[in-house]
Amino acid sequence: MLLRSLLLSLCLATPALADFEQTLSDHILPSYAAFAASTQALSDAAAKDCKADGLKPAFNTAYDAWVAVQHLRFGPAEADGLSVAIAFWPDPKGSGAKSQRALLLGDPAQLTPEHFPDQSVAARGLTGLERLLYPAEPLPADPCALIQATTLDLARMAKIINDTWINTYSKTVLTAGDLGNTTFQTRPEVRQTLFTQVVAALEFDKDQRLGRPLGTFDKPRPERAEAIASGRSQRNVLLSLQTLRAMVVTMTPDAPLTLAGFDRAIKLAETLDDPTFAGVATPQGHLKVEILQQAVSALIDTVMAELGPELDVGVGFNAADGD
């Protein structure tokens, strides 16, 4: 109730122009609540029956919810490396699979709630769980205990992030500029941080989610796409673009070129019909994914040129600088 009252009072005290209060209330808080709820449902399902086929729907629901918050790389999600443990990708050396094999064949005590959070981040989270539910080859041991440990750990991390946002970090954001707030000493710092998340997430989509499987025209790398086993490569790009567009709407109602750029990229992602980006191995398929990548690249330029000034983000700001 205190948080709701604080949100309401601050929203009423600010102009009609959307600002970070609306982003917090309409985007950040409900998205993290959905992620916490979906991971808890996944953990509850695994505790009852750890068979892979039965868990896949709950896994994909939780993964969808993660993509809806993955771009928020500040605050509680970054504490103790939680965001990395939730989704460790890319993993070019295959360290996650190696660590999971050791866990499957090792001491069961490593899978207890007390010890599992100490295991390699590459073996945990959604990417670790995907390898267990969609194995590329037969697993060396019964994965049930590791599946249950992984889902329980996911729910634990999601709850920590959600609870911290609700109990403390929301107030830190909402009281930006107040005496004693050492995290955000001015209100523009919050807007700049949110702007950072949008640009950095678009760059991640362009360079990693699209760039890694694209490789080069002469040497495409479809095997490097994200979430191939679960067939989510294209879906993750689409959900990310849709989520970022929704976030921008809460930040300002006056960014028509930015929203048009999102709409173009989203339409291309929707009509691609290449779930794992396997099509990049063909000239025509490579061109289609490259066109989507170019649309995202153009969108980044538009965001920098239109959304930055609209939010009064300083000239020369670089999204790679973080918050």
Image: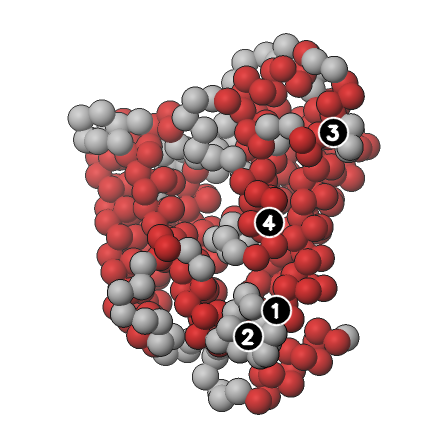
User: Label 2 to label 1, Cα distance in Å?
Assistant: 6 Å
Residue shown at 65% from the left, 82% from the top: 8
Name the residue rendered at 56%, 68% in the picture.
182
Q: Are marks 2 and 1 in contact (CB under 8 Å)?
A: yes
Give the Cα separation between the discs numbered 4 and 1: 15 Å
Q: What's the amino acid at mark 1?
A: Thr
Per the image, the residue denoted by label 3 is 115
Mark 4 vs mark 2, CA separation in Å:
19 Å
Does residue 186 appear in this view?
A: yes
Residue 312: quadrant of the picture = bottom left
Name, please, the residue furthest toward the left. Answer: 218
**Which structural element holds mark 2?**
loop
Is label 3 in a helix, a strand or a loop? loop
Question: Which one is earlier in the sequence, the residue at label 4 or at label 3?
Answer: 4
Q: Amino acid at mark 2?
A: Ala
**Label 4, label 3: how far apart the Cα atoms are:** 19 Å
**Mark 2 — residue?**
176
Q: CA distance from mark 2 to mark 3?
A: 37 Å
Residue under pointer 4: 79
**Quadrant of the rendering where the C terminus is positioned:** bottom left
Earlier in the chain: of badge 4 and badge 1, it is 4
Figure check: 10 above or below 305: below
Q: Is residue 150 visible?
A: no
Residue 172 marker: 1
Residue type indicated by callout 4: Ala
Local crowd size for mark 2, using a 10 Å CA cut-off: few (<14), some (14–19), many (≥20): some
Q: Is residue 61 left or right of residue 231?
A: right
Horizontal side, residue 76 vs residue 198: left or right: right
Whichever of labels 2 and 3 marks the residue nearer the N terminus, that label is 3
